[in-house]
């Protein structure tokens, strides 16, 4: 109905619906502000774990990262009250048994947490949920005596604390175990923790001793009843394999994959990877920060600069790029003899919240400096030259590659800009754009003059340049997240300003599909082929030039 959505296009109201009744008749039990990003609600039934209870959680997301959480414990008569949790707004909250799990994205001071400790940003900690509810309620009511009494019952436990190279990337649950996904220089560890006796504190029970170049995703088979879980693994050269695994088989006396029960099935190899190798390297960014990147190439690679090299990146929204099987890259690039590189630039989550936050808003230039540093490292290492180096990115990655076009045009021979943000003056007025202001900034404030215009590709095309690298822009008419106007406007401006110049600008707009750019497998195959063939031809000097 009217005003049911926020300015960002997400739900603004929570309704309590009874089965068999009309949704529009369901009473509204919570409303967020129109200017918020969204609100949400869910039920958490933890009674199958010792000491656990039933809870109802409501969240009001004021920005993409900052939320207020309201929690109610559901008793037998379902009476109770919602209590606003006294945590930092960018904290992630979940429940396991009697414990409240808190993933911190900034340092949490003793003044705020009710203890004598400071907990480090990037840490995963846990505390008795009921005790923390009581503390939050006392803090909300503001009575010093009650606050002190509630704080005295708090006992925090640290499950993970980051180091200079490690970060927390999420957890999965079985009935009695937490399976933590830890990255160490972007290599993955799975660590297992068992719920203690009587639902008590967690006990470390084993897992991987060394990081692995793979993507492994665990999911409980039935987390209410058993400790079995599904494990899906892949890497750059190995397709996804599904295993049945058992968390109870973990032991601190062993290491590795002793928890695997058996392999169930595997996807077929979609390309020949027998002569390929995967390696990790580090480039040095402009401010001295070491930037990791993965490279997939044929064994015995000749370092003469002639290798067609594709550099991919994203660098935003705390999303980590980790090793995984990408059959389209294998078929379209690696089997042809090309080199594929993924850059773990700032803005992502590879090194935790700080890695992401170091490239927000006015520091967005760090993303682009990091990407440029990786490109220069590849050239200096004689893996490629500017003429044999391409880059590709989509969505926020399209903003990245759009900035490569205007900030480092002489570094690349070809650029693919997919479903991109490009006009940073108006992005917040188009579709879901308003929800991203916590990432980029607000163009209606001083943010525009201070920093946003500097990385708005649409506003930084250099009309005086005689040459730009070969560039392909793609979008979808039906993209409901990033408006196709970004790509359309950019192409029109490039065509107009580049008339009579050596600007090879190509454009394709699929009339179906959403933000993924394609509506079905056939369209996806076409769009993928279009992209990789364009870049390969551009780097091997077979792309047509403007007359």
Image: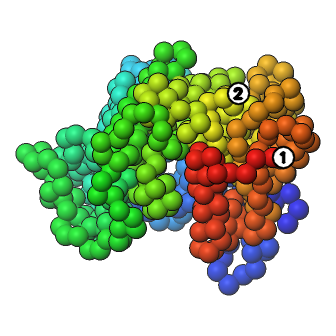
Camera-side residue of 501 and 70? 501
Give percent across and percent down for residue 138: 54, 33
Q: Is residue 166 visible?
A: yes
Q: Is residue 366 left or right of residue 475?
A: left
Report the residue at 51% width, 59% height from top.
Answer: 332
Q: Is residue 47 visible?
A: no
Report the residue at 46% width, 49% height from top.
Answer: 338
Q: Which quarter of the picture shows residue 387? A: top right
Camera-side residue of 430 and 1? 430
Considering every residue shown, the one lying at the far top of the view is: 287
Q: Earlier in the sequence, mark 1 or mark 2?
A: 2
Give percent across and percent down for residue 35: 80, 43
Q: How far is disc 1 from disc 2 in space, using C-alphas? A: 25 Å
For disc 1, the marked residue is: 547
Q: Are marks 1 and 2 in contact (CB under 8 Å)?
A: no
The answer to whether 521 is drawn above or below residue 256 in the figure is below
Q: Which quarter of the picture shows residue 211? A: top left
Q: Is residue 374 left or right of residue 545?
A: left
Which secondary structure, mark 1? loop
The answer to whether 497 is drawn above or below residue 535 in the figure is above
Q: Which quarter of the picture shows residue 62? A: top right
Camera-side residue of 212 and 37? 212
Give percent across and percent down for residue 468: 74, 35
Q: Is residue 10 left or right of residue 375?
A: right
- In which quadrant of the rendered image does the N terminus lie? bottom right
Report the residue at 47% width, 24% height from top.
Answer: 380
Alpha-carbon neighbours of circle 1 within 10 Å: few (<14), some, or many (≥20)?
A: few
Which secondary structure, mark 2? helix
Camera-side residue of 222 and 451? 451
Give percent across and percent down for residue 483: 80, 53
For disc 2, the marked residue is: 407
């Amino acid at each position: 109905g009217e005003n049911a959505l926020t300015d960002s296009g997400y739900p603004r109201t929570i309704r309590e619906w009874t089965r068999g009744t009309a949704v529009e008749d369901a009473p509204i039990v919570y409303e967020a502000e129109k200017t918020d990003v969204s609100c949400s609600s869910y039920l958490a039934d933890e009674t199958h774990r010792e000491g656990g209870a039933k809870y109802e959680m409501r969240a009001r997301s004021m920005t993409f990262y900052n939320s207020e959480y309201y929690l109610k414990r559901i008793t037998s008569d379902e009476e109770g009250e919602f209590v606003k949790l006294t945590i930092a707004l960018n904290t992630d909250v979940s429940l396991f048994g009697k414990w409240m799990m808190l993933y911190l994205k900034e340092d949490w001071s003793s003044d705020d947490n009710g203890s004598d400790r400071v907990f480090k940003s990037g840490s995963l900690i846990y505390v008795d949920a009921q005790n923390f509810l009581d503390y939050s309620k006392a803090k909300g009511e503001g009575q010093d005596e009650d606050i002190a009494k509630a704080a005295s019952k708090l006992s925090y436990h640290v499950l993970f604390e980051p180091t200079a190279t490690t970060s927390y990337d999420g957890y999965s649950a079985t009935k009695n175990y937490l399976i933590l996904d830890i990255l160490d220089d972007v290599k993955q560890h799975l660590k297992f923790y068992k719920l203690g006796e009587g639902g008590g504190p967690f006990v470390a029970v084993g897992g991987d001793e060394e990081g692995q170049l793979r993507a492994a995703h665990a999911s409980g088979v039935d987390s209410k009843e058993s400790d079995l879980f599904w494990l899906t693994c892949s890497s750059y050269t190995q397709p996804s394999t599904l295993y049945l695994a058992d968390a109870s088989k973990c032991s601190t006396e062993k290491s590795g994959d002793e928890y695997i029960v058996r392999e169930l099935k595997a996807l077929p190899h979609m390309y020949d990877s027998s002569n390929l190798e995967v390696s990790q390297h580090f480039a040095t960014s402009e401010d001295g920060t070491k930037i990791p990147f993965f490279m997939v190439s044929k064994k015995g690679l000749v370092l003469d600069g002639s290798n067609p090299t594709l550099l991919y990146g994203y660098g935003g929204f705390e999303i980590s790029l980790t090793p995984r099987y990408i059959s389209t890259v294998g078929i379209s690039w690696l089997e042809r003899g090309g080199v594929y590189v993924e850059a773990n630039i700032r803005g992502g989550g590879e090194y935790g919240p700080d890695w992401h936050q170091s490239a927000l808003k006015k520091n967005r230039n760090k993303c682009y400096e990091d990407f440029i540093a990786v490109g220069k490292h590849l050239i200096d290492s004689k893996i490629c030259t500017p003429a044999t180096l391409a880059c590709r990115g989509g969505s926020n990655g399209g903003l990245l590659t759009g900035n490569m076009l205007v900030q480092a045009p002489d570094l690349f021979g070809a650029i693919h800009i997919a479903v991109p943000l490009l006009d940073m003056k108006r992005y917040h007025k188009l579709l879901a754009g308003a929800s991203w202001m916590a990432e980029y900034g607000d163009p209606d404030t001083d943010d525009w003059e201070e920093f946003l215009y500097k990385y708005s590709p649409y506003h930084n095309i250099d009309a005086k340049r005689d040459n730009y690298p070969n560039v392909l822009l793609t979008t979808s008419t039906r993209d409901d997240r990033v408006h196709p106007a970004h790509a359309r406007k950019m192409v029109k401006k490039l065509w107009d300003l580049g008339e009579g110049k050596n600007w090879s600008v190509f454009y394709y707009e699929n009339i179906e599909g959403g933000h993924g750019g394609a509506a079905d497998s056939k369209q996806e195959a076409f769009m993928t082929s279009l992209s990789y063939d364009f870049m390969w031809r551009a780097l091997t000097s077979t792309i047509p030039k403007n007359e």
